[in-house]
Image: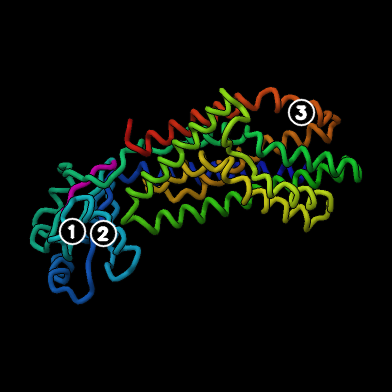
C-alpha cells in the first residue's frame, strides 16, 4: 500500500517538474520564427548564403525553426500560415513567419527576408491572421480545475463501486484494495494514452486546425448543454453515460476478479466512458494544440487528478466505509456533478468558438 502511494507521489512530482520546465522554457522564448524553405530553391540558397538565419538564431528570446516544406509536418504548418494570411495564391519559398504572443506577421521572398527580418523581429507589427482561434494561454490552474471537475463524474464512480462490491463478496478487503488501485492505474494509463493519441492527431492537422477547433468546440458545447439538462431534468432524454449494451460485458468481467480481467476492465471502461467523461478532456487537448504546448507533463497531471477520487474511494472502502453509503452520496450529488461538468464544458467551448 505504501509503495503504491509513493509511486503516485513520485509520478505527481515528476509531472509538476515537467510542467514547470515547459512553462519556464515557453516564458523564456518571447518570439518564434518559422523559416520555410525547399531544397534546390535558389532564393532559399540566397537566404542561407546571407547569414541572416545565423543572426536570427543568436537573438535573445528568439527561437528559429527551419522547416523543409517537402516534409509533411512542415507542409501542414506552411499551409496553415498561408491560409491564415490569405496568401495561398501567391505563396512560395522562402517564407518566414514571426509569432509573438499568439500574433503573427510574415516575410515572403529572399530579399525581404534578408533585408527586413531583423527589424521585423525586433520591432514586431501584427498582420491580419484569420485562421488563429482566440485562446488564452494554458495554465496549471486551468488543468487542475478542469481535471478536478472531470474527476467527480458519476460514470467513473459507478464502475469502481460495482467492482469493489463484487470483489468484497468474493474475497478479502486487501484483495479489493489491490484490485481498486490496479483498476485506477489502468484507467490512468489508458486515458493518458488516449490523450497523447488525440493530441498527436490534432497536431498533425495544423492546416485544418481552425476547423478541428470549431468542430471540437461545437461538440463540447452540445455535451455541456446535455450535462446541464441532466441537472434540471435528470434521466429524461439523452444523457452522457456508459452505453447500456456495454454493462453486461462489464459485469461479467468484474465477476472474474482476476488480474487480466481487471486490466481488460480498465481498458474497456476507458473506451465506453469517453462519451461520458471525454468532453472536458477534449477541450483541454484542443487548448494544448492551439497554444502549441507539447502537453506530456500536463496530461500526466490531468490524469493523476482524474483518478484521484477513484483512489480515495478505494481506500475508504478498504478502511471499512460501506459501499452503500458512498453510492448514496453519489446519487444525492450526481446532479451537481453534472452541472459543474456542464458549466466547464460550456466555458471551454465558448473559448474554442472564439466567443471570448
- The residues bearing labels 3 and 1 have C-alpha atoms spaced at a distance of 59 Å
State the residue at coordinates (83%, 36%): 318
Q: Nearer the viewer, residue 235 or 67?
A: 235
Q: How is the image coloured?
A: rainbow
Position of residue 319 measured from the top left corner of the image (x, y, whole percent): 84, 32
> Which quarter of the image is occupied by the N terminus?
top right
- The residues bearing labels 3 and 2 have C-alpha atoms spaced at a distance of 53 Å
Relative to 158, 339 lies left or right:
left
Q: Is residue 186 visible?
A: no
Does the magenta run of residues contain 103? Answer: yes
Residue 352, by quadrant, is top left
Q: Dot 3 lies on which element?
A: helix
Relative to 20, 333 lies left or right:
right
Relative to 12, 196 lies left or right:
left
Position of residue 190 measured from the top left corner of the image (x, y, whole percent): 62, 52
Q: Which mark is residue 88?
A: 1
Residue 231, by quadrant, is top right
| Within-10-Å neighbours for mark 1: few <14, some 14–19, many 20+ | some
Please say if the residues under marks 1 and 2 sit with CB atoms less than 8 Å apart: yes
In the figure, 293 relative to 226: above or below?
below
Please say if the residues under marks 3 and 2 sit with CB atoms less than 8 Å apart: no
- The residues bearing labels 1 and 2 have C-alpha atoms spaced at a distance of 8 Å
Q: Which mark is residue 311?
A: none
> Which quarter of the image is occupied by the C terminus?
top left
Q: Dot 1 lies on which element?
A: loop
Residue denoted by label 3:
326
In the displayed orientation, state which residue is furthest to the bottom. 40
Q: Which mark is residue 79?
A: 2
Q: Dot 2 lies on which element?
A: helix
For the magenta stretch, what is the residue range?
A: 102-106
Amino acid at each position: 500500500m505504501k509503495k503504491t502511494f509513493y509511486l503516485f507521489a513520485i509520478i505527481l512530482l515528476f509531472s509538476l517538474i515537467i510542467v514547470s520546465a515547459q512553462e519556464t522554457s515557453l516564458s523564456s522564448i518571447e518570439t518564434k520564427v518559422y523559416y520555410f524553405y525547399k531544397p534546390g530553391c535558389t532564393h532559399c540558397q540566397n537566404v542561407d548564403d546571407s547569414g541572416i538565419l545565423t543572426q536570427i538564431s543568436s537573438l535573445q528570446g528568439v527561437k528559429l525553426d527551419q522547416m523543409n516544406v517537402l516534409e509533411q509536418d512542415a507542409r501542414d504548418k506552411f499551409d496553415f500560415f498561408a491560409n491564415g494570411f490569405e496568401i495561398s495564391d501567391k505563396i512560395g519559398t522562402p517564407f518566414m513567419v514571426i509569432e509573438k504572443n499568439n500574433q503573427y506577421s510574415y516575410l515572403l521572398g529572399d530579399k525581404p527576408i534578408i533585408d527586413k527580418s531583423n527589424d521585423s523581429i525586433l520591432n514586431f507589427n501584427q498582420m491580419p491572421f484569420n485562421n488563429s482561434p482566440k485562446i488564452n494561454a494554458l495554465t496549471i490552474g486551468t488543468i487542475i480545475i478542469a481535471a478536478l471537475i472531470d474527476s467527480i463524474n458519476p460514470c467513473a464512480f459507478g464502475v469502481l463501486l460495482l467492482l469493489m462490491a463484487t470483489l468484497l463478496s468474493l474475497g478479502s478487503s486487501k484483495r479489493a484494495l489491490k484490485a481498486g488501485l490496479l483498476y485506477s492505474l489502468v484507467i490512468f494509463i489508458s486515458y493518458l494514452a488516449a490523450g497523447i493519441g488525440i493530441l498527436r492527431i490534432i497536431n498533425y492537422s495544423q492546416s485544418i486546425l481552425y476547423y478541428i477547433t470549431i468542430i471540437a468546440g461545437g461538440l463540447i458545447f452540445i455535451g455541456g448543454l446535455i450535462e446541464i439538462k441532466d441537472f434540471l431534468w435528470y434521466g429524461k432524454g439523452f444523457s452522457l453515460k456508459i452505453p447500456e449494451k456495454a454493462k453486461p460485458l462489464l459485469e461479467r468481467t468484474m465477476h472474474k476478479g482476476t488480474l487480466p480481467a481487471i486490466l481488460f476492465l480498465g481498458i474497456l471502461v476507458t473506451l465506453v466512458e469517453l462519451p461520458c467523461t471525454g468532453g472536458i478532456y477534449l477541450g483541454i487537448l484542443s487548448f494544448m494544440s492551439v497554444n502549441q504546448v507539447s502537453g506530456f507533463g500536463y496530461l500526466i497531471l490531468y490524469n493523476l487528478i482524474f483518478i484521484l477520487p477513484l483512489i480515495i474511494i478505494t481506500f475508504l472502502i478498504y478502511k471499512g466505509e460501506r459501499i452503500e453509503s458512498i453510492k448514496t452520496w453519489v446519487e444525492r450529488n450526481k446532479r451537481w456533478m453534472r452541472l459543474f461538468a456542464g458549466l466547464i464544458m460550456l466555458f471551454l467551448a465558448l473559448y474554442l468558438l472564439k466567443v471570448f
